[in-house]
Image: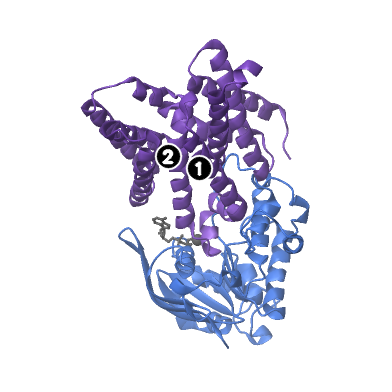
Amino acid sequence: MVEFLSYGFVQRGLLAGSLVAAACALLGVFLVLKRLSLIGDGMSHVCLTGVAVALLTSTSPVYMSIPVVAVASLGIMKLAKKFKIYGDAAIGIISAAGLSVGLLLTALAGGFNTDLLGYLFGSILTVTRGETILCALLLLIVAGGIFLFYRLLVATCFDESFACTRGVPVRIVDTGLVLVTSVAVVLSFKVVGIFLISALIIIPPVTALLISRTFKQVLWLAAGFGVLSVWIGIYISFIFNIPSGAAIILINLFFLFAGYLLSKGVPRG
Amino acid sequence: MPVVITAKNISFAYVRMPVLENISFTVEAGDYIGLIGPNGGGKTTLLKVLLGLEKGRGEIQLFGTALEKFTDWNKIGYLAQKSPVAQSRFPIAAEEVVLMGLPGRGARVGRNELKEVYAAMRQTRTRQYAGRIFNDLSIGQQQRVLLARALVSKPELLILDEPSTALDVESREMFFDLLAQLNTKYHTTILLITHDTGEVGKHISKFMYVDKKLVFFGTREEFCHSPAVAKQLGPFAQHTIDHLHNQHGHCPLGASCKECHHG
Ligand SMILES: Nc1ncnc2c1ncn2[C@@H]1O[C@H](COP(=O)(O)OP(=O)(O)OP(=O)(O)O)[C@@H](O)[C@H]1O
Ligand SMILES: [Mg+2]
C-alpha cells in the first residue's frame, strides 16, 4: 500500500479521482431526484465527439470536450422542454448523435488508437496537473453552490411548482446544474472511462438515498461512497492489474448492494 | 380597499382545449373568497395562471404589480391541490418542507427561522412530526405540513386549492377556524377552492363560480338569494345553495330567510 502510494502519478490520479467522484456524486443526488440522471449517460457519449475532434486537431481531449458537451447538454434541455414528458427520449437522441458523430470523426482520424481506448476505458494514471486543478475547481464550485443555494436546489427537486411560487428561478437552477454536470462528466472520463461515467453520477446517490434519514446525510454519504470507491477501486486495479474504471464501478455496485441490505434491515423514523 | 389581485380577460387552453375563457375580476384586501365549480371547471388552472405556473392570455396584477414583474413572493402562501410527487425515497424532514416557505436560500438555518417554522407547524398541529421524513407521514398529516408551509411566511394573500380534502373532522374544523381568524384578525386575503360546501358557508365573504367562464362573482348574500343566479348555475350550485340554507344559523339572512329550513 505504501509503495503504491509513493508514485507521484498514483497520488495525482487518486486526488483527481476523489475530487471528481465527490463532485459527480453531489450533482448526481439532485439529478437522480429530478429524474435527470440519465443525462450523464447522454453527455458521456457526446464526450466521444469531443475526444474525436481533439484527436483530429491534436488538441487536449479534456479541454476540447468541455464546450462540446456543455452545448450538447443545453441541447438536451431544449429538446426535453419541447417534448415535455419525453425527457429521456431527448437524452437518447443527443446521446445517439454524440456517439455517431464521434465514431465518424474517429474513423476520419484514422481509426481507433491507443489514446482513444484510454478514454473509453479510463486512464486515471495519465491525469495531468492542469486537469487535477480543474477537478479541484469543479468540486469547489459544486460544494459552494450547494452550500449557498441548498434550499433552492432541494425545493426544485421536491416540489417544482411551489419553488416557482417562491420566486425560485427554476429554469436557471436547472441549466446551471446541467452545465456544471457537463464539466464533471468530461473531467470524469479519464477516471472511469466514457462508458462508465454515468455510474459515477447515479450509483453513489442511489446508495445514499437508500440508507439516509436526512437530506444532508444523503449528500455527505453520496460524496463519501464516491471517494471511497475511487480509492478502493484504484488499489484493487493496481494489485490485480485490471482496468481502474471497471474496478471503481464494481466497488460502487458492491456499496449499492450493501446499502440495499442495510435499508431492508434498518427502520427509519 | 387596496386591490390584491386584478385579472383582466384571462383565457387559457391546454393543447387546443380551452379551459378558461375571458375571466375578469378583482380581489380586494381582506376578501375571503370561495372559488367553487364542477370538477374540471378550471379552478385549479385559474390559480396556476394567477401564480404564473401556467402562461395564459390576459392581464394579471398581484399587489398592483404586473405578474411578469412581481417578485414579492413572500406575500403569497400557496397550497396546491396535488401533493409534491411522492418520490419513493426523498429523505427530507417535515420541518425542512415547511422551511421552504421562508425566503432563505442557503444551507444555514437561522434560529429565528426555526422558531417561525415551529410556530407555523403548531398552527396546523404538526409540530410533533417536525423530525419525521415527509413521505413517511400519512396523506392528511402531509397536507397539514404543506399548510404550515403555506402559512410560515405570514402571507398577506393565501391561495389554497382544496386544502381540507384529506383532513379528519377535528383538523378540518381547526383549520377553517384558523383561516377565519387570520382573515378577521390579520386581514389576510384568502382565495380558497373547496367542494366542502358545508364549511364554505361559515366564513366566506364572496363566492366565485368558475365553469370555463366566470359564471358568478359576488357576495354570499347575492349568491344565496338570487334565484336568477341559482337557475343559471345549474344543479351543482343549487346543491351548494341548498346546503347553505340548510345550515342552521349560517344563512346570512338568518331567521328571516324564507328558503331556510329552520327548525
Ligand atoms: N396538465 C393538463 N393537461 C391537459 N389538460 C389538463 C391539465 N390539467 C387540467 N387539464 C384539464 O383542464 C380542465 C380543468 O382542470 P382543473 O384541474 O383546472 O379543474 P378543477 O376545476 O380544478 O377541477 P377539480 O374540482 O376536479 O379539482 C379539465 O378538463 C382537465 O382535464
Ligand atoms: Mg382542482
Q: What x and y, as percent, mark residue A37?
A: 47, 39
Relative to A8, is B148 on the left or the right?
A: right
Neighbor class of circle 1 (other Cα within 10 Å; few <14, some 14-19, many 20+) is many
Which picture quadrant has residue A207? top right
* Residue on which disc 1 sits: A31
* Residue on which disc 2 sits: A39
Please tell me whether residue A6 is drawn above or below residue A164 in the rendered image: above
Residue B3's tag is none
Which picture quadrant has residue B166? bottom right
Q: Give A112 or B118, whichever is nearer the viewer.
A: A112
Please tell me whether residue B153 is drawn above or below residue A256 in the rendered image: below
Disc 2 to disc 1, how far (Cα)?
Answer: 8 Å
Chain identifier of the residue bearing label 2 in the image: A
Please tell me whether residue B217 is drawn above or below residue B168 in the rendered image: below
Tell me the kind of residue under disc 1. Leu
Badge 2 vs badge 1, beta-carbon distance below 8 Å: yes
Relative to A136, is B172 on the left or the right?
A: right
Q: What x and y, as percent, mark residue A185?
A: 45, 37
Q: Give B89 or A224, whichever is nearer the viewer.
A: A224
In the orientation shown, which residue stands out farthest toward the top?
A240
Question: Which colour denotes chain B?
Answer: blue
Neighbor class of circle 2 (other Cα within 10 Å; few <14, some 14-19, many 20+) is many
* Label 1 secondary element: helix
Question: Which colour denotes chain A?
Answer: purple
Q: Does residue A91 appear in the picture of this structure?
A: no
